[in-house]
Amino acid sequence: MTGGQGEPSLALGIAFGFLSSLGPLAIDLYLPAMPGMARSFAVDTGGIQRTLSAFFLGLALAQIPLGTLGDRYGRRRPLLGGLTLFILGSIACAAATSLDQLILCRFLQGMGACAGTSSVRAMIRDRFNGHRAAKLMAFTFLIIGISPVLAPLAGSVLLQMMSWRGLFALLAGGGGIALLAVLLFLPESLPPERRIPQLPMLASYRQLLTSPAFLGWTMVAGLGTTIPFAFVTAAPFLYTQGFGLTAHQYSLLLALNAGTSIVATQFAPTMMRRLGARRLVTVVALIAIGASALMALTSVSLAVSIAAFQLYAMLLFALAGLVLTPAAISALDAAAGGAGAAAGLLGTLQLAITALASGAVSLLPSMAVLPLTLLLGGSFTLMALVMLALGRRQAG
């Protein structure tokens, strides 16, 4: 049984948020260093960008095995193992002498960072469900959301005091703090009597993959994550070449978007309790579809101003923030099997959907408002269709 352990504490929310933020920090902190890294290894920017792809690949592939191990052995041991791998991978990144070494080490670092995200979702599901789980998940997203706002700025400041290798050493230190905190302060959330000692892995994932509710809510979670990732993929070109902004100006606008999403995420648990998850997502999707249709029509007939586009972007980031918590909680609640397996599969599918959408953005014209608007509006349209299908299934 989940739940029944009182209200989530602030300390638990901070701990979960810090563990979950290791991955985003490892992504965002070194972004300002990428040009210097390219010079250091005498490679083009595409070579350095592959270190980011390797990290995402490790992050995605480790979700399922870590979740499965968590269901069988408890949450702490896979989490401690993952954090150890993250520390070793970070140290190896700092010491890498070739691009190939760095790519491999980033892959291992991504696998280690996955332990924080996957284990935290499962531990929340172990302790709470419904509104209380949503409150804890929303607070976790709050801490995670700060990373894209502050980490690149912190990275650029730190680069004035150290080389890019020092940034990876700092990430190793952050992993060490997380490891120590888990050892000293974070108890096991899955007691032995609730573990699955002979976990039939294929059967467990087959059950999840044939659950319409789990798949539907996982798709919504992936589509919700798609909004900021697709936008960030297109924004540097659209803001600079389409609207003529400097890198500093569009960075401030991106930070404003991220801040809007962070604030909206904190309202999600209350709105989920009042409206229910399915109704909340449906309302959010319909508002976003209307706003996207209006922006698309405007871009066809008129020149869209930066002010109008920024208001549209902030609205969509806020709406995406309202979706993430109910989607993740509803997906985990819909899983009949182990929470670790469900959290792992949720993370993998969510990343896959996001990666597909980001890839689609790279194929679209980069300096026009209309293609990006159609993609973002299409994501919310799919959300609405999924909610309609789940509603009909419940009614049936």
Image (tube, rainbow, N blue to C red):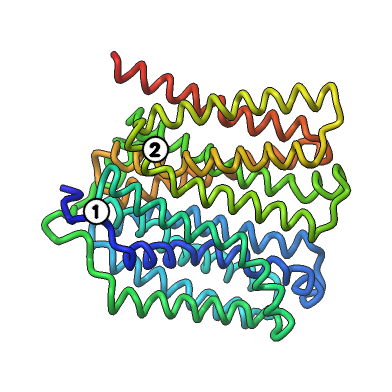
Instruction: Report the front residue among 189 and 356.
Output: 189
Residue bearing the label numbered 2: 271
Quarter of the view holding residue 96: bottom right
Q: Sequence order check: which comes first, mark 1 or mark 2?
A: 1
Position above or below: 119 against 345: below
Choose mark 1 or mark 2, whichever is in front. 2
Q: Please give the name of the residue rendered at 42% of the width and 44% of the height, measured from the top-left corner.
A: 325
Numbered disc 2: secondary structure: helix
Disc 1 marks which residue?
A: 126
Q: Residue furthest left?
A: 193
Q: Is residue 210 visible?
A: no
Task: Name the amino acid type tagged 2.
Answer: Met
The foreground one among 218 and 21 is: 21
Residue at left offset 42%, top offset 79%: 177
Amino acid beneath label 1:
Asp
Name the residue at 18% across, 53% down.
196
